[in-house]
């Protein structure tokens, strides 16, 4: 029987750690005959073609302008941006990165009924850039009930639902796929946030909803697919939709008793355990919680402290630079090992953690996350000009790096990142971590979803800032968990969520 003092989230995290002693024994050969298709097909429904609205011709009427905005929002969130030839069907790339190119997320649009988009349920078909209207009835009241009457849904007309098709990632990553799914979904949430900034929409993030009710609303086969985030989309060009913020995360009760769960069944059991039951009589306080006093960590008088303040990145008028960066972004496959400048690192961190510096460029001052106070940032520096090698803690409130270890970790990082050259050749590697026990005390086991989506969201902002500056960036979700803490001096209580490697891309010969 598992330790009754360990919740199912802690049990899942421990069970899915990579360890150098067992990783090869636990690895399984891929069954290529079962390789999942990363697109969902509907055999019925009315299609709304968004491709004609990709061009932004001027002197258009209100209806065409609205469709242009929606088209840009969706293509910049999850649309196709390239294709790699193969012996069969090309391998398509999307605007949001995904581990292994598996793209487990799906996007659904729920319309309350607008002058241009009839009420009902839609699936975004990224392969054809179309919306499939597969249910033509008003379901908005059911959505409100499933979201426990979140006040944002009172005045909005559209909502995005992000789901996960689990086997797309499980096929390759087995039970650890749950981590990858929510990191990938965090990338997508980051894109949705930024695409809304380009199109005068504002997404309001809801992570607290009745899972079964949302799944039934969208007619999911719950053995294959489940809703993981709801985002009412406010139209900022409509005065009544400029809305106050609301709470994004609701807790669940930690599950301390559970059976012995065999490998291969852990992901599905854990997902079920993190669900919120439907309760039509639930009374939820949707007010944003008061910010908690943050511990000023690693602020030792003797440690090296480096200011990271800098001018904001210029994303060009109408955020055209951001749009081009999203469309042309690719994960870097190899770094040259050349150093980055300290100002380049400053700019990447500034865009990621200081959104208030970008309001004059039409970005949101305070974009929605679940709870960033739970996510910590450590940076292993191996090649930054004018910055001593070592491991640093990044303090967002004071915008400074605080050195906690003094060493060049290139050899160790190569090992920690499962022998990937990206770890060895990166100039800096960003680690997102969380005190899992403390997080569970606050939100229950569902916090495991929140933490990984927030880490993925931050990771996507890092990606885009780096690519825009001509740097290379690559997310790494596979690493030797415990050894990261040991080597870098990160406290044992901090669970490593995600790694993003930064460097100078190697030029193709």
Image (tube, rainbow, N blue to C red):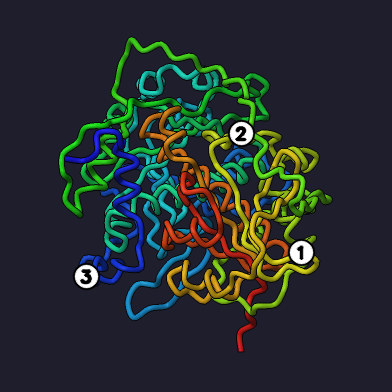
Location of residue 479 in the rendering, given as x and y in whole percent from the top left corner:
43, 62
Residue 391 as seen in the image, left or right of residue 387: left
Of circles 1 and 2, the one toward us is 1
Residue 360 as seen in the image, left or right of residue 124: right
Of circles 2 and 3, the one toward us is 3
**Residue found 33% across the figure and 40% down from its top:** 9
| Mark 1 element type | loop
| Mark 3 element type | loop
Q: Earlier in the sequence, mark 2 or mark 3?
A: 3
The residue furthest bottom is: 509
**Residue found 24% across the figure and 69% down from its top:** 25
Residue located beneath label 3 in the image: 31
Location of residue 8 in the rendering, given as x and y in whole percent from the top left corner:
29, 38
| Mark 2 element type | strand
Residue located beneath label 1 in the image: 387
Of circles 1 and 3, the one toward us is 1
The residue furthest front is: 302
Q: In the image, is residue 83 above or below residue 301?
A: below
- Which of the pair 433/180 is nearer the observer? 433
Asked whether the beta carbons under mark 1 and mark 2 sit within 8 Å of each other, the answer is: no
Location of residue 169 in the rendering, given as x and y in whole percent from the top left corner:
33, 57
Residue located beneath label 2 in the image: 202
Image quadrant where residue 89 sits: bottom left
Location of residue 349 in the rendering, given as x and y in whole percent from the top left corner:
70, 52
Q: Which of marks 1 and 2 is nearer the N terminus?
A: 2
Quadrant in which the N terminus appears: top left
């Amino acid at each position: 029987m598992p330790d009754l003092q360990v919740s199912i989230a802690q049990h899942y995290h421990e069970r899915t750690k990579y360890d150098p002693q067992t990783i090869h024994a636990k690895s399984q050969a891929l069954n290529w005959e079962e390789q999942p298709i990363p697109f969902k097909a509907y055999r019925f429904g009315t299609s709304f073609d968004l491709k004609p609205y990709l061009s932004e011709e001027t002197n258009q009427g209100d209806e065409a302008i609205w469709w242009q905005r929606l088209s840009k929002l969706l293509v910049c969130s999850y649309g196709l941006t390239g294709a790699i030839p193969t012996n069969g069907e090309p391998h398509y790339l999307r605007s949001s990165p995904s581990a292994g190119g598996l793209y487990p997320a799906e996007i659904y649009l729920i319309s309350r009924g607008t002058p241009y988009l009839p009420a009902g349920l839609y699936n975004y078909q990224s392969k054809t850039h179309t919306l499939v209207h597969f249910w033509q009835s008003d379901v908005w009241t059911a959505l409100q009930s499933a979201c426990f009457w979140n006040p944002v849904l009172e005045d909005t007309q559209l909502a995005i639902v992000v789901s996960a098709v689990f086997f797309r990632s499980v096929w390759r990553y087995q039970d650890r796929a749950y981590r990858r799914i929510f990191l990938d979904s965090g990338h997508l949430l980051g894109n949705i946030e930024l695409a809304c900034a380009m199109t005068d929409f504002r997404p309001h993030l809801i992570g607290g909803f009745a899972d079964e009710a949302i799944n039934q609303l969208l007619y999911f086969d719950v053995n294959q697919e489940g809703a993981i985030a709801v985002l009412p989309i406010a139209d900022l060009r409509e005065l009544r939709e400029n809305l106050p913020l609301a709470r994004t995360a609701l807790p669940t009760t930690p599950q301390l008793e559970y059976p012995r769960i065999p490998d291969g069944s852990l992901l599905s059991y854990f997902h079920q355990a993190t669900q919120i039951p439907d309760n039509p009589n639930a009374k939820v306080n949707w007010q944003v919680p008061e910010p908690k006093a943050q511990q000023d960590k690693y602020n030792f008088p003797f440690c090296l402290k480096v200011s990271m303040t800098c001018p904001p990145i210029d994303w060009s008028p109408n955020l055209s630079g951001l749009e081009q960066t999203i469309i042309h972004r690719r994960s870097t496959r190899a770094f040259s090992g050349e150093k980055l400048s300290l100002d380049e690192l400053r700019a990447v961190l500034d865009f990621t953690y200081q959104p208030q510096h970008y309001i004059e460029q039409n970005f949101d001052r305070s974009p929605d996350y679940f709870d960033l106070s739970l996510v910590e940032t450590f940076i292993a520096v191996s090649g930054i000009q004018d910055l001593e090698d070592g491991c640093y803690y990044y303090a967002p409130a004071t915008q400074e790096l605080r050195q906690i270890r003094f060493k060049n970790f290139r050899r160790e990082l190569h090992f920690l990142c499962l022998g990937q050259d990206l770890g060895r050749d990166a100039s800096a590697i960003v680690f997102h971590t969380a005190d899992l026990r403390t997080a569970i005390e606050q939100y229950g086991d569902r916090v495991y979803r929140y933490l990984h989506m927030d880490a993925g969201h931050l990771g996507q902002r890092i990606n885009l800032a780096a690519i825009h500056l001509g740097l290379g960036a690559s997310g790494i979700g596979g690493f030797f968990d415990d050894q990261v803490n040991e080597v870098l001096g990160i406290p044992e209580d901090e669970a490593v969520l995600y790694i993003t490697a930064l460097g100078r891309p190697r030029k193709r010969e």
